[in-house]
Every structure is written in structure tokens, then in C-alpha cells.
Image (cartoon, rainbow, N blue to C red):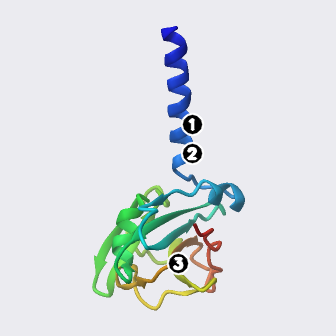
């Protein structure tokens, strides 16, 4: 009887753990169908979408109460690993979701880079400022796409699937 309980409890924990956090995926339906929303009961929701160079992508949803949420706060609350450095021109993102695995310089010439987009009303546009200066309103998204150095006009990541 006890071993049956342990197996059932383990199965429940595995299903909860596996279904609660999205992972990078190249299939938009799979990635977005597992989206969890931190603070789902909050009056407003914003999203972070990350697309790797491989095409795999993930998204996160963050609920918030004020009129807007800034880029620094949404990145910090998203749970997505990232590294940034302060430069003379502002904060630069060097690594997101462990891509690239290693780097010497945050913004190295002729190296792949993270490009930032902002989504509003179902359309992506290039971010007008660095991520820390962005303000997202309800239902808007911050989008990251890792691109080759020679990609001068990168496409945005997939649109988020909204809650």
C-alpha cells in the first residue's frame, strides 16, 4: 500500500513539474501550450518571448498590478536566465537562456547577438531603447531573438500566445 502511494505521489509531482514550466521548443503549439503565468490573477499580463538561433523558442507570462511593467522587472520576474553588462550606451544583454554558452565580450564585433523587439497589438517592432528602459502595458511583450552577426535585418520571434 505504501509503495503504491509513493508511486502515485511521484507521478503527480512529475506531471506538475513537467507541465508548469515551458521549455524551448521549435513547435510553437507545444511551447506556448505549456505557458505558465506568474501572478495569473493580476489585472494585467505581459510576456517574454525568447527565440534561440536554432529556432527553438519559449515564452513566459508575468502578471502585474500597476499600469505598466518595465523590461528589467519582467526579465527578473520571468525566471529566464540572462546576463547583462552596463556599457556607456546602457545595459547590454550578453546571454539569454544560456545562449551563447560562453562569451568573452558582451557585444563582440562579428559575433552572434541578441536582438530586442517589443510586441503591441499583435505586431512586433524593433525596441526603441534597451530592455531596462522599455515599459510594457497590458498584453504587450518583450521579444529576444539570437541572430548571426551578418543578419542586419532579423525577423522577430514568434508572437506570444496570450492567456
Instruction: Tell me the quarter of the image containing the C terminus.
Output: bottom right
How busy is the neighbourhood of tag 3: few (under 14 within 10 Å), some, or many (20 plus)?
Answer: some
| Residue for point 52% across, 8% down | 1
| Residue for point 28% across, 86% down | 88
Vertical placement of residue 101 versus 137, above or below: above
Look at mark 3 in the image and give the residue it sits on: 139
Q: Can residue 38 be seen at all in this image of the molecule?
A: yes
| Residue for point 43% across, 68% down | 63
Q: Quadrant of residue 156?
A: bottom right
Q: How many marks?
A: 3
Q: Is residue 40 left or right of residue 146?
A: left
> Could you tell me residue 89's position as x and y percent?
32, 87
How busy is the neighbourhood of tag 1: few (under 14 within 10 Å), some, or many (20 plus)?
Answer: few
> Could you tell me residue 134's position as x and y percent?
40, 84
Q: Report the Cα–Cα distance between label 1 and label 3.
A: 28 Å
SS of the residue under disc 1: helix
Vertical placement of residue 29 versus 133, above or below: above
Q: Earlier in the sequence, mark 3 or mark 2?
A: 2
Look at mark 2 in the image and give the residue it sits on: 19
Identify which residue, 151 or 55, lies in the foreground. Answer: 55
Query: In the rendered structure, are the residues bearing label 1 and label 2 in contact, judged by CB atoms less than 8 Å apart?
Result: yes
> Could you tell me residue 10's position as x and y percent?
51, 25
Q: Which mark is residue 15?
A: 1
| Residue for point 37% across, 83% down | 67
Q: Which mark is residue 162?
A: none
Q: Report the Cα–Cα distance between label 1 and label 2.
A: 6 Å
Amino acid at each position: 500500500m505504501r509503495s503504491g502511494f509513493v508511486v502515485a505521489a511521484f507521478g503527480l509531482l512529475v506531471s506538475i513539474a513537467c507541465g508548469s514550466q515551458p521549455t524551448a521548443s521549435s513547435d510553437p503549439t507545444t511551447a506556448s501550450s505549456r505557458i505558465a503565468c506568474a501572478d495569473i490573477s493580476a489585472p494585467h499580463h505581459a510576456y517574454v518571448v525568447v527565440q534561440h538561433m536554432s529556432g527553438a523558442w519559449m515564452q513566459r507570462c508575468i502578471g502585474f498590478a500597476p499600469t505598466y511593467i518595465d523590461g528589467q522587472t519582467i526579465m527578473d520576474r520571468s525566471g529566464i536566465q540572462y546576463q547583462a553588462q552596463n556599457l556607456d550606451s546602457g545595459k547590454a544583454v550578453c546571454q539569454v537562456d544560456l545562449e551563447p554558452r560562453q562569451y568573452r565580450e558582451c557585444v563582440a564585433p562579428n559575433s552572434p547577438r541578441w536582438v530586442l523587439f517589443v510586441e503591441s497589438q499583435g505586431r512586433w517592432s524593433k525596441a526603441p531603447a534597451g530592455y531596462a528602459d522599455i515599459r510594457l502595458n497590458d498584453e504587450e511583450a518583450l521579444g529576444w531573438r539570437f541572430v548571426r552577426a551578418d543578419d542586419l535585418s532579423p525577423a522577430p520571434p514568434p508572437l506570444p500566445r496570450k492567456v
